[in-house]
Image (spheres, rainbow, N blue to C red):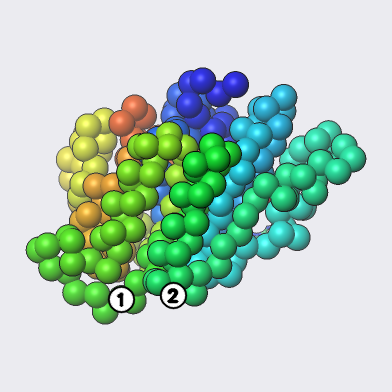
Amino acid sequence: EHLAGHLPTRLKGLDKALCGGIPFGVVTELVGPAGIGKTQFCLKLALLASLPTSYGGLDGQVIYIDVESKFSSRRMIEIGSKSFPEVFYREGMAKEMAGRILVLQPSSLPEFTDSLQQIKVLLLQNKLKLLIIDSMAALVSGEFEQTNNPRQHPLAWHISFIKSLAELSRIPIIVTNQVRSQTHGDSLFSFQHTVGANSQMQSRPDNPSRFDSHLIAALGIHWAHAVSIRLILEVRSGQRYLKIAKSPISPPLQFCFEITASGISL
Ligand code: GTP
C-alpha cells in the first residue's frame, strides 16, 4: 500500500529527491520542447499506476487526457513489456492493465470540460489513481491576451478544478506543457514564481528569472500557482536533462536521462 502517497517513477534519483516519487494530492507539471519525451514519461507513469500493488503499482484506473492524439497503445505495450516483463507476460495481465487506462481525446475546450466532468464519476467509485493531461497549453490558442483578472482566462475553471481535484481526491495529477524551444538555454531552469528551496537558484546572476513567455501567455499566472512540482525536460549538446525546477521539498537538481525501447530512464 502506498500510504506515503507517492507514485514511484522508478527513476531512482528523481524518486529519492521527491521522497518517493510523484506525490498524491498535488499537480506535477512536465515542461519541455516538442519531442523531448514528455509523452514517453506519461506513458510510463500510466503503466506504473496500473500495475498490481504486488509489483509496486497503484493497482488502479488511470485517466489519460490526450489532447493532441499522441497516445500510442502500441508504444505503451512496448514500454510495459520491456520494463515489467514478469508482469506483462503473466496471462491476461497486459490486457487487464491496458483496460485500466482510459484514454480521452478531447479536440476542443468544451470537450475537455466534458472529459474533466467524466472524472467525477470514477472518483466517486474511488478507483481512479492517476490523472494525466497531455497537454494543457495545447487547449488554448496563443492569441489569448493576459488580463489582470485570472478568472477571465479561458482555462480558469479547469485550472481551479484540476487543483481542487488533486487536493480532494489525493491522487497524483500530471500535466504536460510544451515550450517553444530550448534556445533560452539555462533560463528554462528558473521560473519567476519558483519559491522556497529554489530561491537560491533564482538569484544566480547567470540565470535570469525567465520562463517561456509563450507558456505564460497561454496559461497565465493562475496556472503557475496551481502547480506544486515542475519538472523541466530539455536537451543540451545532444544530452537530455530532467530538472526539478519547482518543488516544496527538493533542491533544484538535474539528471541526465535517455529514452530507450523500455521508455524513459535515468
Ligand atoms: P511533444 O508531444 O511533441 O510536445 O513532445 P514530447 O515531449 O511529448 O515527446 P515524446 O514523448 O513524444 O518523445 C519523442 C521522443 O521519444 C522521440 O524523439 C524519440 O526519441 C523517443 N521515442 C518515441 N517513440 C519511441 C519508441 O518507440 N522507441 C524509442 N526508443 N524511442 C522513442
Name which residue lies at 13% across and 68% down: 147
Disc 2 residue lies near ligand 1 with CB under 8 A: no
- Residue 142's label in the rendered image is 1
User: Can residue 232 be seen by looking at this rendering?
Assistant: no
User: Considering the numbered disc 1 on the image, is that residue within a helix, a strand or a loop?
Assistant: loop
Name which residue lies at 18% across and 61% down: 151
Q: Which quarter of the figure is the C terminus placed in? A: top right
Name which residue lies at 50% across and 56% down: 118
Query: How many neighbours does mark 2 have within 10 angstroms: few (below 14), some (14-19), or many (20 or more)?
Result: few
The amino acid pointed to by label 2 is Ser
Identify the mark nearer the N-term, 2 or 1.
2
Disc 2 + disc 1, Cβ < 8 Å: no
Name which residue lies at 71% across and 32% down: 52
Q: Is residue 130 above or below residue 103?
A: above
What residue would you read off at disc 2?
108
State the separation of the CA atoms marked 2 and 1. 15 Å
Residue 129 spot, x, y in % from top left: 55, 39
Q: How many marks?
A: 2
Front residue of this view, candidates 234 and 34: 34
Q: Which quarter of the figure is the N terminus placed in? A: top right
The amino acid pointed to by label 1 is Gly
Front residue of this view, candidates 47 and 122: 122
Q: Quadrant of ligand 1?
A: bottom right
User: Considering the numbered disc 2 on the image, is that residue within a helix, a strand or a loop?
Assistant: loop
